[in-house]
Image: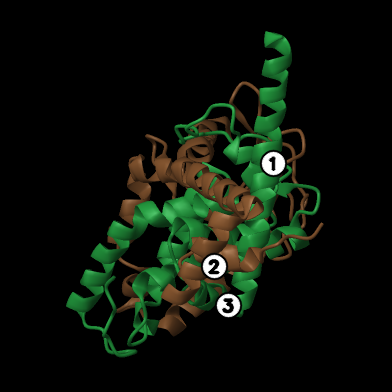
């Protein structure tokens, strides 16, 4: 993983261009992370776009030794929390797209899970936001607990706890559902 | 319910957080304990399914607008060469001009009280619908009449969904009617036929719906 070696407030035009290219290369992962947080492809792309705009305005704030990908994930996480807070204040009667109460999204770009009987999306929607962030960063993005802790600005133990609870909740939904369907199948076969 | 294993240790094992000694201990535990085996298997399967689902995003085409956002000059770069004080002064002037004019779109017989929006000209509807349906947040669509006296820039800002599944989008309109310019915010909902209908328009700083 590329470690940035730029000193704060000392980026020249070429260094910024390098970061732009780095940002383009990161887009698929950023979209995946945002999709997990928002659970909606439309709002996820909005979130990524917002984070990119914010990052480009603040490239000079990239510090020496900062992992650029971690910095971007942190911006997305922060912007999403801001978005959720803003929604509570301004539109209490509406749900921001991506809330766990919302139904399936307008545009579904995913190709589905390996087993059609396993409804991953439904399981993901049952996770609280803090657990989704931790699960996405550790289980999907492959960050260590300490790296995820820096992105989420919480202690490593909290990350471990959230990942653990998230996994248990996923398992509950996925396996109870799969188990139930297997039982139904067995009954029908009998 | 008690377990003969520590779930957090098994989880750390799965996430690669243990050193070699710790890994060996958990390997040994998994060999002995059916419960531990079941936990590791279930957790591994959940993670694998989740990965497969989320990794599908990686294969999708990147929306052009995201690439344009990155490749476009940043707001900071756009501001270079234009004195900030001048921008602030211009904003204040526009604000007072806007608040003072009282009338918005309707120049016809029906007078519209200050602070309210009567209607949006039908000629603006296609570009507004297009922007609400296809534009990402903060991405604008523009339209100008052939005569040059009407122009509008539409920029969606936020997206919402209510409990019935209806989508709503907030948007920002930058209007020019003749010599007059006005900025308005709106809230539209998406009908079951896929059309966007504006349900509220407002233009004060507190975002009070009218």
Chain where mark 3 sits = A
Residue highlighted by disc 3:
A156
**Mark 2: few, some, or many residues within 10 Å (few <14, many ≥20)?**
many
Residue B59 in the image: x percent, y percent?
A: 34, 41
In the image, residue B106 above or below residue B192: below
CB under 8 Å between discs 2 and 1 = no
Chain drawn green in the picture? A
Residue A47 visible here: yes
Is disc 2 placed on a helix, strand or loop? helix
Residue highlighted by disc 2:
B12
Residue highlighted by disc 1:
A173
Q: Report the front residue among A115 and B204.
A: A115
| Label 2 to label 1: alpha-carbon separation | 22 Å
Relative to A182, is A153 on the left or the right? left
Is disc 3 placed on a helix, strand or loop? helix
What color does chain B have in the rendering? Answer: brown
In the image, residue B148 above or below residue B30: above
**Mark 1: few, some, or many residues within 10 Å (few <14, many ≥20)?**
some
Q: Report the front residue among A40 and A53.
A: A40
Chain where mark 1 sits = A
| Label 1 to label 3: alpha-carbon separation | 26 Å
Residue, x 39% and y 36% (percent of image)? B147
Residue, x 35% and y 73% (percent of image)? A68
Residue B43 in the image: x percent, y percent?
A: 58, 51
Asked if badge 2 and badge 1 are on a common chain, one would say: no
């Amino acid at each position: 993983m590329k470690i940035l070696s730029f000193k704060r407030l000392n980026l020249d035009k070429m260094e910024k261009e390098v970061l732009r290219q780095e940002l383009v290369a990161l887009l698929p992962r950023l979209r995946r992370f945002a999709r997990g947080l928002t659970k909606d492809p439309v709002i996820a792309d909005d979130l990524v776009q917002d984070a990119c705009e914010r990052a480009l305005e603040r490239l000079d704030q990239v510090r020496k030794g900062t992992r650029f990908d971690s910095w971007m994930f942190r911006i997305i996480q922060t912007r999403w929390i801001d978005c959720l807070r803003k929604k509570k204040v301004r539109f209490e009667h509406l749900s921001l797209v991506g809330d766990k109460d919302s139904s399936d999204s307008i545009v579904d770009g995913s190709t589905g899970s390996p087993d059609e009987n396993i409804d991953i999306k439904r399981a993901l929607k049952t996770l609280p936001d803090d657990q989704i962030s931790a699960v996405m960063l550790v289980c999907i993005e492959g960050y260590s607990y300490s790296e995820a802790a820096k992105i989420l600005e919480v202690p490593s133990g909290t990350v471990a706890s959230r990942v653990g609870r998230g996994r248990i909740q996923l398992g509950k939904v996925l396996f109870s559902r799969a188990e139930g369907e297997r039982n139904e199948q067995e009954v029908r076969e009998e | 319910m008690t377990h003969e294993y520590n779930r957090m240790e098994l989880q750390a094992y799965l996430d690669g957080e243990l050193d070699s000694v710790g890994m060996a201990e958990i390997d040994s535990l998994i060999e002995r304990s059916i419960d531990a085996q079941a936990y590791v298997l279930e957790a591994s399967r959940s993670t694998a399914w989740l990965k497969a689902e989320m990794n599908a995003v990686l294969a999708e085409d990147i929306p052009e607008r995201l690439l344009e956002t990155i490749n476009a000059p940043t707001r900071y770069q756009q501001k270079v060469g234009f004195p900030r004080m001048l921008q602030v002064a211009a904003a204040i002037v526009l604000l007072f001009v806007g608040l003072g004019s009282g009338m918005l779109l309707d120049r016809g017989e029906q007078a519209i009280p200050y602070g309210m929006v009567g209607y949006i000209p039908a000629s603006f509807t296609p570009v507004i619908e297009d922007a609400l349906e296809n534009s990402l947040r903060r991405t604008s669509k523009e339209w100008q009449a052939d005569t040059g006296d009407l122009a509008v820039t539409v920029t969606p800002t936020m997206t919402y969904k209510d409990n019935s599944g209806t989508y709503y989008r907030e948007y920002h309109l930058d209007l020019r009617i003749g010599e007059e310019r006005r900025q308005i915010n709106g809230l539209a909902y998406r009908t079951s036929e896929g059309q966007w209908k504006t349900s509220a328009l407002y233009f004060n700083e507190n975002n009070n719906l009218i």
